[in-house]
Image: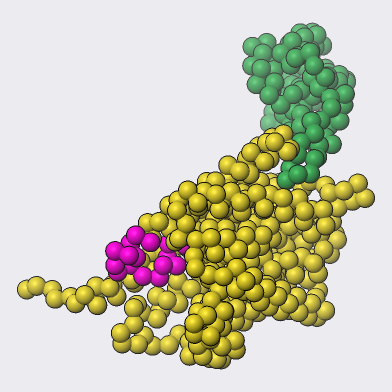
Chain colours: A yellow, B green
Amino acid sequence: MTADVSILEQHYLLNTLFLLFSGALVMWMAAGFSMLEAGLVRSKNTTEILTKNILLYALACIAYQIMGFDLMYQDNQAGGWLPSFGFGIEETLIGAKQPKEVEFFFQVVFVATAMSIVSGAVAERMKLSAFLIFAIFMTAVIYPVEGYWTWGAGFLGTSVKNGGLGFSDFAGSAIVHMAGAMAALSGVILLGPRKGRYTSKGAKAMPGANMPLVALGTFILWMGWLGFNGGSQLALNSITDANAIGKIFVNTNAAAAAGALVAYLLSNTLYGKADLTLIVNGALAGLVTITAAPDSPTPTLAILFGAIGATATFFAINFFDKIRIDDPVGAISVHGVAGIIGILLVPITKDVSLISQLIGLLVIGSWVFGSSLLVWFVIKKIFGIRISEQDEYEGADISECGIEAYPEFVGGKS
Amino acid sequence: MYWLTAIVRPFKLNDVYDQLVEEGIGGMTVTEVKGLGSQRANTEVYRGNSYSHDFIPKMKIEIAVSEDALERVIDTIVNSAKTGKPGDGKIFVSKIQQAYRIRTNEIDLDAI
């Protein structure tokens, strides 16, 4: 008996395998963000930030499954700006490239990534409940709407020939990373800095508690990113696809490496020592930068792009400190600034116009920033978004979770 | 009976401990502490902002010793903990009024 599998079926199977493999890698980035953030906060806020990371992942999955995925991808008008409203995941159509559920799985881990970016920036001072309420809005509405504009065939992504803007963002430098950073920035503006972070004498350093976790988180993110960018080819059924994915892996890896090295050189030159946390930010900035177009630059150009993104991010971290935007992990600089740089570098290697890229950034940026600001504001008015001064002093672990990350001298009343 | 409180550099703890054991000291209490003295903390830079730890980590060793062992123990600690730079630490000596061993009800010199 011989199995008789048609070419189309083979394509279907390969695409499915490839997207599930990539999706699993991207899901792993949730672990990367958790470790990175847990390492960069002070030990009294460790449990809370881990709780936040697990719950935001869970919430993102449910909210996107119920509503977000439909808003972003299903039954939408091509070239439009208002997505059609609906729920759930539709049946797989005959002739589809892969099952609908597989498409959903690959997309849901992206929305979780966008939300993870927010958690680091608001760390150590935000109420857990306020953050979780925001996560629902972000993953069910704010992200899916802007995602539809480009990836769901909306007006940004549709080519100029077909009456769209021709905005190009391969794997989400703007759609995922800058969006996360904008949501974070609007939250941080309403939230304010950690108590004691900025004094009349300037910024005070609040060193992270656990550098091994920072390094582990970085490598997990670096690895997951290969699925993030590689998987965004969305298919593996031809030599063209295989070639593109190979190139994406090399470029993604090279940009991260360049980013880390540039941050090391800058930190060593300007501050006198190799600051691990800045090197880590540099590697991640390289990754965010190349995400806009990992498939088109030559590997040498990818090194340059990673270096440019990391340099901009390095100085952005300093700049945000100057204007007293307190971001414990550097998420706004890494994902926002490098995201913007990545999008603006696309015209160098692809036939898209710089104007389209600028308009796309402006549209996505102002939508996410504006709608997030509104949601944060309403949550602040109704529930409040900040823990009390006393709770902040004692640590969010106790006030929000009732568990310390490293308890000692525990007694019990029974 | 004397109560010795020695504050030493953390990385000197092993040397002090080894020497004390060689001198026949069989018991001590060790605590991680932080403090302020003549040693100046290094200024470091974290994410572009300079900072220094106000208090420097030290190890506190507490030992109960008999009168005839006192000088020998102090010499041992001084010799094994010294580097000659500010921050080597201090030794404080005070009298113990009474001592009890919980397990056996022994008292004073028998207890330490």
* Residue B69 image position (x, y, % from top left): 77, 10
Question: Which residue is at a point 50% across and 79% down the rendered structure image?
Answer: A159
Q: Residue at x 50, y 61 (%)?
A: A349
User: Which residue is most to the left?
Assistant: A1
Using the image, determine if residue A208 lies above or below residue A183: above
Query: Is residue A392 among what the camera can see?
Result: no
Q: Nearer the viewer, residue A130 or B20?
A: A130
Q: Residue B102: which quarter of the image?
A: top right
Q: Nearer the viewer, residue A293 or A103?
A: A293
Q: Is residue A35 above or below residue A191?
A: above
Q: Magenta stretch: residue B109 in it?
A: no
| Residue B84, percent from left and from top | 79, 13
Q: Residue at x 69, y 68 (%)?
A: A182
Q: In the current view of this chain or complex, which residue is farthest to the right? A: A200
Q: Which of these two is toward me, B18 or A83? A: A83
- The relative height of residue B76 versus residue A204 in the rendered view (above or below) is above
Residue range (magenta): A228-244
Q: Residue at x 80, y 40 (%)?
A: B50
A340 lies left or right of A290: right
Quadrant of the rendered structure where residue A148 is? bottom right
Residue A234 belongs to the span the image colors magenta: yes
Q: Is residue A139 left or right of residue A323?
A: left
**On the rendered structure, is A382 left or right of A121?**
right
Residue A283 spot, x, y in % from top left: 57, 49
Looking at the rendered image, the quarter that the N terminus of chain A falls into is: bottom left
Inspect this view and state whether residue A350 appears: yes
Total residue callouts? 0
Give the x, y percent position of residue B28: 71, 24
